[in-house]
Image (tube, rainbow, N blue to C red):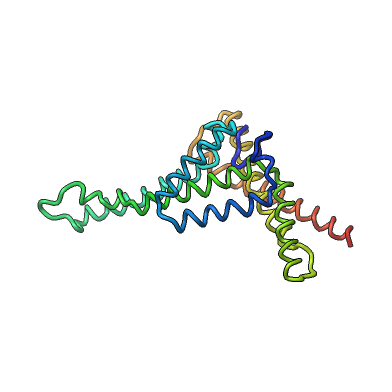
Amino acid sequence: MVTLFSYKTGNSFLHKIPSWVKLLFIPLINVLFLILPSYFACGLVVVQFILACCLHFSLKEQFTDVKPVFYYAVLLYGFKLVLLIAGLFQGNGVTEGTDLYSIFAPLLDLDTFFLLIKLFCVMQSASLVFKTSTLLQLREGIEIIEGSIRKFFHLRRKNTFTNAISMFLNFIPMLAQIWEQSKKAWQARGGKKGVKMYGVLLPVLFSVGMKKAYNQARAILVRCKDTF
């Protein structure tokens, strides 16, 4: 079962890179393509796709991780289309001799397209990190980074940020797994994909997710008490 940001075992060079290096390098790349011209982001999409293929990530696995961007694109352009149709019915900006390109120009906005490309890059980068680093490795990497910062600034408190952010990172693939399991259970009982499925399964996702979060929080609290 392929789920969002699920770890994939391997022995590639990217798997061997320490997680703290990836956690520092990936945000730097993301900041660069947000600052640099949009064509840099387009090139990075191709580079990251080739890299994922070299790491033997299937097209299905890659698409699963970037699928939220396509949903956002459909929502964004759908909203633009609704506003455009509403404007046409009201006659806004439509005069005699107006060509089709001028009417549908808002849908061909390059700024929106490049924004989606940049979001696509962000999801690709996150996918490479999650697929080549276990949750334990990510936690250890965050702990190393926070520990170094606290040591540099002579802070004596423990790594409280590590616990919070590692739990957040853990919930992303966990919720994706719960959703996929719920969908398989729905389909196994003869249910069909549609509005009814989302109406039934979303409350299940919320309930099971909250239950797992509560159990994990209690487990961490018990460990903290045992430590002290």
Residue at the location (48% across, 46% down)?
120
Horizontally, is 6 left or right of 159 in the view?
A: left
Q: Estimate the x, y position of residue 126 in percent, counting from the top left.
A: 58, 47
Q: Estimate the x, y position of residue 13 in percent, counting from the top left.
A: 65, 38
Q: Is residue 177 visible to us here?
A: no
Q: Is residue 96 visible to us here?
A: yes
Horizontally, is 102 left or right of 77 in the view?
A: left
Above-or-below relation of 38 to 185: below
Residue at the location (53% across, 44% down)?
124
Residue at the location (22% across, 53% down)?
89
- Viewport quadrant of the N terminus: top right
Horizontally, is 101 left or right of 80 in the view?
A: left
Q: Nearer the viewer, residue 27 or 191?
A: 27
Looking at this rendering, what residue extends furthest in the left direction?
96
Q: Nearer the viewer, residue 193 or 126?
A: 126
Q: Nearer the viewer, residue 14 or 227?
A: 14
Horizontally, is 209 left or right of 83 in the view?
A: right
Res. 142 image quadrant:
bottom right
> How many discs mark residues in the rendered view?
0
Q: Estimate the x, y position of residue 175 in percent, counting from the top left.
A: 63, 45
Above-or-below relation of 105 to 154: above
Q: Estimate the x, y position of residue 35 in percent, counting from the top left.
A: 46, 58
Above-or-below relation of 127 to 164: above
Residue at the location (17% across, 55% down)?
94
Res. 178 image quadrant:
top right
